[in-house]
Image (cartoon, rainbow, N blue to C red):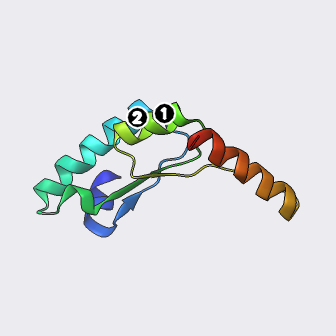
Amino acid sequence: MFRRVVTYGNGWMPWLYIAEQIRQGRAALNDLAREAGRTPNSIEVVAAPVPAEREVLRAYEEAGADEAVVFVMPATEREMSEELEQIAQKIFP
């Protein structure tokens, strides 16, 4: 799979991977990218879904994820806005 990402794509979005799995995948992608003459950071890694917790997000970042997807539960516009505000306060106090 990683060889295909390097050959044909520009990103990897693993689903339900823990930070250590992201670290291992990022390392494999980096090695294959160098072998193919690509810059490793030209391949974006997006972890999904990730809990909206500052320490967890930091662990994914340190593991090599460029971005993370945090889910909010479907609700009314007002409820979603409130939930997003709570998430933002937890992550960026």
Image position of 43 (left or right of 60) = left
Image position of 40 (left or right of 82) = left
Dot 1 lies on which element?
loop
Up the image or down, 47 lies above or below 75; here it is above
Residue position for label 1: 18
Alpha carbons under labels 2 and 1: distance apart: 5 Å
| Residue 11 x/y as whole percent | 38, 61
Q: Is residue 69 visible?
A: yes
The residue that appears at 25% across and 41% down in the rendered structure is: 27
Dot 2 lies on which element?
helix
Confirm or deny contact between disc 2 and disc 1 (CB under 8 A): yes
In depth, the one of 77 and 14 nearer the eye is 77
The residue that appears at 55% across and 48% down in the rendered structure is: 48
Q: Residues within 10 Å of mark 2 (few under 14, many from 20)?
A: some
Q: Residue furthest front?
A: 93
* Mark sitting on residue 2: none
Residue position for label 2: 21
Quadrant of the drawing holding the C terminus: top right
The residue that appears at 65% across and 44% down in the rendered structure is: 89
Tag 1: residue type? Answer: Ile
| Residue 49 x/y as whole percent | 59, 46
| Residue 82 x/y as whole percent | 79, 52
The residue that appears at 50% across and 31% down in the rendered structure is: 55
Image position of 57 (left or right of 77) = left
Tag 2: residue type? Answer: Gln
Q: Residues within 10 Å of mark 1 (few under 14, many from 20)?
A: some
| Residue 69 x/y as whole percent | 56, 52
Q: Is residue 72 visible?
A: no
Q: Quadrant of residue 60?
A: top left
